[in-house]
Amino acid sequence: MATNNFLFITNFKTYTEASGVNAEALLKIHDEVAGEFPHVNVTCAVQALDFGAVSDFPNVKKLAQHVDPACAGSYTGKIVPERVKNMGGWGTILNHSENRLEREVLKESITSAKRSGLVTIVCCETAEEGWSFLEFEPDYLAVEPPELIGGDISISKSQADVIKKALKLIGGDKLLVGAGVRDFDDVRIAVEYGARGVLVASGVCKAADPAAALRDLLSGYPVV
Ligand code: G3P
């Protein structure tokens, strides 16, 4: 298992290409390619219904795409952080712009996930919003301008000012960026500006050759 400072997240979302048997296949691809990049902590955010069904792979850490502030007991339809942990989860994304939470719920969700031993990756739409979440003590803050998500223009190439502001407000230790990240250069630029890593979804899940796309993206991290 890679233990290092750089983080890479592929968010499987609900893409058909990353669901069910395809989720297992995509994780396997991540495992094989991640073995070539031991200086990068490679993680995959698998959708809830696939989480318990997919295998554990030695070079890839599993993330939940969301958890609720719920525990074992009288809850219905919730994703329980403790179960995610027990099923081999390393961490969870929270407050993705496709699954936004009320501020108080976010606070409770972070506390609950951390209590269960999950690493918390909290999404924010702006640097300022990320800064406002620091008081909840998430492990990582991922800045993703919503208008760039799923597109071909990356935050790295089009919103350098946002990354620089985020670095100032949030600090490099916790900072991740995402949206429109497609290639080696997008990752290189983000890391050069001081981010710890990137989140990618369509650039890997929808790629004609996910292994090649992943290899290209992971080449953007400096070898340390
Ligand atoms: O969680 C990452 C995601 O929102 C970015 O999506 O498709 O722009 O890489 P995409």
Image: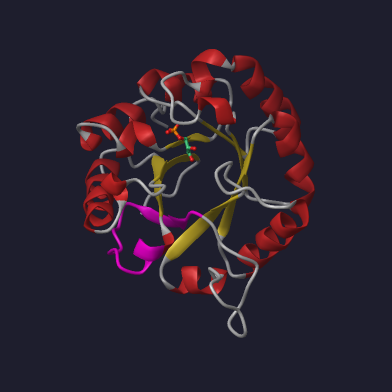
User: Where residue 144 sits in the image (x, y, percent)?
Assistant: 57, 32
Classify 34 as above or below 45.
above
Q: Based on the displayed image, in which of its 4 quarters is residue 120 positioned?
A: bottom right
The verdict on residue 162 being magenta is: no
The verdict on residue 57 being magenta is: yes
Residue 75 falls left or right of residue 202: right
Residue at figure coordinates x 59%, y 17% from the top left = 159
User: Where residue 161 sits in the image (x, y, percent)?
Assistant: 65, 16
Residue at figure coordinates x 28%, y 51% from the top left = 27
Looking at the picture, tell me which residue is in the foreground, 197 or 37: 197
The residue range painted magenta reads 49-65
User: Where residue 79 sits in the image (x, y, percent)?
Assistant: 53, 68
Residue at figure coordinates x 40%, y 40% from the top left = 40
Residue 121 falls left or right of residue 90: right
Looking at the picture, tell me which residue is in the foreground, 80 or 187: 80
User: Where residue 16 sits in the image (x, y, percent)?
Assistant: 29, 48
Classify 101 as above or below 176.
below
Q: For the N terminus, give its image quadrant.
A: bottom left
Classify 42 as above or below 112.
above
Q: Based on the displayed image, in which of its 4 quarters is residue 200 positioned?
A: top left
Residue farthest bottom in this picture: 73
Q: Based on the displayed image, in which of its 4 quarters is residue 127 positioned?
A: top right
Residue 10 falls left or right of residue 169: left
Residue at figure coordinates x 54%, y 14% from the top left = 158
Q: For the C terminus, give its image quadrant.
A: top left
Looking at the picture, tell me which residue is in the foreground, 5 or 165: 165
